[in-house]
Image: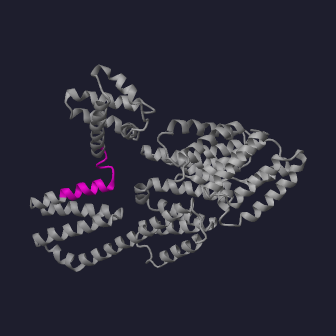
Amino acid sequence: MTNIDIVHQLIHSMSRTEKAYFKKYARKQQREKDDFYFKLFDAIDKQVVYDSNRLIKKFKSQKLTVKQLSISKHYLYNLIVSNLLEYNQNKSIQAQLHQQIETIQLLHKRSLSSQALKTLYKAQKLAQKHEFFLYILLLKNLEEEILRIQMSPDLTQYLNQGFKEEQRINQQWLNLRHYRYLATKFTFWNKQQYSSRTEDSDLITENFLEEVKQVAPPLSIKAKFLHLHCLLDYYTQKSNFHKAREVLQQQVVLFEENPAFLEQRSLTYITILNNLGVNQRLTNDLESMLDTAAKLKAFKCKTIHEEIQIFESWAQTMLIYITYSKPAPQHLSELILIEEQFKILENKIGNEFKIIIPYGLACCYFWRKRYQQALDWLELVQNRCTKQLMPDLKIAARLIKLIIHYELDHQYYLLNANESTYRYLSYNQRLYKVEATLLKTLRQLAALASPQQASSIFKAFKEKLLLLQEDPFEMGALQLFDFIQWADQKINRPITSTI
């Protein structure tokens, strides 16, 4: 049976405190005969990989059938969701505002206007602090209603200023929505470019930037962030990594200077630090990468989601740093630590990082000539990539495997795998110049009678790549793996790594 189950996923997404709350408070509200559901909760929680057959065997005394298990899990799922909503009701700003608005309406219906207004002004401050403009507008509407019915002297001040304030807030809201629309549109476009680069891509990217320029300047912290997000997507698409780094640094400052915004969008802040680490590799600023990794490691996690994302981002940053920095004795222990943590969190991390981290480990082991370990991780990458999910890494993994088989002198396998890769790339319309140049070079190397003749082939290979790295259609492959560095090593015959 399938090892993917929504109840299993939900339970394993819960923090330790959430699980304790569920067992303590949800149990109080259930009848004694419903104790079975809490035993089922514990049984599923203990399963690293979901196995329905084991659950049926565990509860065989209840004569549990497949259908009964499905019904029980459905009930348990709803019970958990209900309990999580109760547990988190005061933990999000939106939940607090919802509760305060209900309180205001309750007090207002009971003609307790002064109490209602006191709660209302408190809610307004909270909504303004976190730039929840729709809530502010709703609260303004409630304020007018209460003052109008009460005919309070404060109504005069509201009539003089209140509607103007509503117009200003509405303008902020529309401004934010416009930037949100453009950011979503630009991000979606960029995602498409990973699998479908065309000759029109550059023109469309320029048109997007013009569209962003036509919008009024950002009127809120959230809008400023989205404006920077659009610029970041533009510079990334144009491969202007130095400009992209400036934007990323502005985003980091925006978060750190606005603690309320950081508290509300902590996962986004972690993602930005992760993107900054990747960018620092592209701008060859390896020392700054260590600072970024240290900032990620020092982040104080409050939720399991933050803990998982910190691992994803820190691991990726460290793997890139280790891949491109000079070998050092501590690197191997850091790789082992990342491997261990990856295996523990593998079922919880995002699908992209289930590919990115193995790919990073494979690259690290490749440059340290631990080829079998690199092959093992590359196999995992190939199995997890799809046409929709990181197809570029699947291609990169195939190419690196060819290089490893060349290094291991697997000549017969190399010839067959080379042809297989050529057919795969041609069929999927992904045979760009970098890929074609590598395949041709490996065919030439495999046909050599003497290894001494290889130097001239590697020099020609490097010269072609140096020309291709200026081509926007080709630089993507060279960012995923440093084929030029590999050619340099073969030309210069470097000393074997100490690791």
Q: Residue at x 65, y 54 (%)?
A: 425
The image quadrant that residue 216 belongs to is bottom left
Question: Which is more toward the observer, 66 or 300?
Answer: 66
For the question of whether residue 411 can be seen, the reply is: yes
| Left or right for 86, reference 466 | left
- For residue 122, above or below residue 447: below
Q: Taking 399 as reference, is 226 left or right?
A: left
Horizontal side of residue 422 vs 86, given as left or right:
right
Q: In the shown orientation, is residue 158 left or right of residue 188?
A: left
Q: Residue at x 84, y 56 (%)?
A: 459
Which residue is painted at 23% across and 66% down in the image? 139
Q: Quadrant of the C terminus?
A: top right
Nearest the eye: 124 or 246: 246
Q: Position of residue 457 (x, y in %)?
A: 84, 54
Q: Quadrant of residue 171?
A: bottom left
Span shown in magenta: 87-103
